Amino acid sequence: MIRSKLFGVVLGAAFLGLAACQSGNDAPEETAAPVVDTVALLDILYDEYDEDFLEMNPIFATFRGDNRFNDQWGPYDSLSDEYAAAALAMNKDYLERLLSIGGSTLSGQELLSYEIFKLERENAIERSEQGYDDFESLMPVSQFFSMPSFLVMLGSGATAQPFVTPEDYDNWIKRSTGFVEHVDLSITRMREGVELGVVRPRILMEKALPQLQAQIVDDPEQSDFWGPIARMPESIGEEDRARIEAEYRDHISKVLVPSYKKLHDYIADDYLPNTRETIGQGDIPGGAAYYAFKVRESTTTDLTPEEIHEIGKREAARLFEEMKKVRDEVGFEGDIQAFFEFLKTDPQFTLHLKKRLLRRMTSYAMSSTHCWTRVSISRRKPTTSLSRSRNFGRNQWRRRNIFPAHRTAHGLESFISTLMTYRLVPTT
């Protein structure tokens, strides 16, 4: 369907060019260049990439509110060689197609979308060809973010994976079965990392072990993965309820718990003794080059890590001086560290009640005209993929009005309440 749209755009442009040539029989013969809608071509390209990306990364689709792939782990596990090869081929293909369309006629948001898409494809290709993706895959488990901890959040029903209908429950069993292969690949990659000296700091893996241990339970009802069963909607009938409960009990006991135990035992018995006491990325083979790439990728500059660090130090010093001015303005007696402690511990700066916090934040928001934001937070149904592509550059960093149509205390209270629902704002 998408490629037929692309064909339609090109065919239409050719038709317009032909019509222009035939419209004036008395005019001197000349060949008119076809009128090509570059923006339309790029929108279709972005749309195609978006669809291909979601098919390769179905869990990401679920977080987007796209429920077509809720039963899928992915065509390839993210740690597999097949995934790496497919991702590289896809990024090369889309970069080549992007450059063939070109961006010389673009301006404004369309040019921004073009440049962002181009930069992300170039970075992804560099990641793969320079071995940075492989480097990351050698250390797949951490205490902060990795698939074992992410799976718990997803399967507990606390995040994007829906658990409303019997089909939703069946989808999760199908999807989470992919964790078995992921654990095997994780162990394989970590063994390769040990041989190469590319390993996590010991202090981090010591923190990861209790997280894994927490999922090794004798009673499935004590598992975090039992959460969707405990909160099963009343709309699900008794027959489905009994079937789902039995299947989840079996799945947790025979699939998920053994996988967590296998990973935990490998890390505790084999990997932990080979971890390192250092903590810097540059302390392992290839780490310095990888870190320099991450700095370039994150800052979109050619500055070195050392140069970025110096910028941070200068900015920290500037802010520190500003804080001292505030301390002096309010007449606080004591050094700056005592002032920080005062701000953290004095009861006047703590809002214990949700309503008080809501009023304070509403008052603050009403006094601000603008805010900086990356993306909008909403409960809207997902837009079509084509309309998403048209907003590709529009969701990047930009200055925007905050609720221009709802700048009322009521509208802002609703917004802040939504933030509390998403746990982006503390309520205690």
Image (spheres, rainbow, N blue to C red):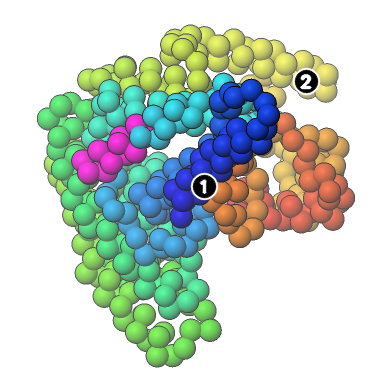
Please provide percent x and percent y for residue 322: 72, 16
Q: Quadrant of residue 238?
A: bottom left
> Does residue 294 lie above or below 24 as drawn?
above
Judging by the rendered image, the residue that carries numbered circle 1 is 8
Please provide percent x and percent y for residue 184: 18, 50
Magenta residues span: 79-92
Q: Is residue 261 rendered magenta in the image? A: no
Quick one: 174 or 192, which is closer to the camera? 174
Picture residue at 82% right of the left edge, 44% below the top: 404
Picture residue at 15% right of the left edge, 34% below the top: 192
First reached walking from the N terminus: tag 2 or tag 1: 1
Quick one: 14 or 354, which is closer to the camera? 14
Q: Nearer the viewer, mark 2 or mark 1?
A: 1
Tag of residue 326: 2
- The majority secondary structure of the magenta stretch comes to helix
Q: Residue furthest front?
A: 26
Tag of residue 311: none
Q: Residues within 10 Å of mark 1 (few under 14, many from 20)?
A: few
Q: Is residue 84 rendered magenta in the image? A: yes
> Does residue 349 lie above or below 156 as drawn?
above
Q: Amino acid at mark 1?
A: Gly
Residues at badges 2 and 1 in contact (C-beta under 8 Å)? no
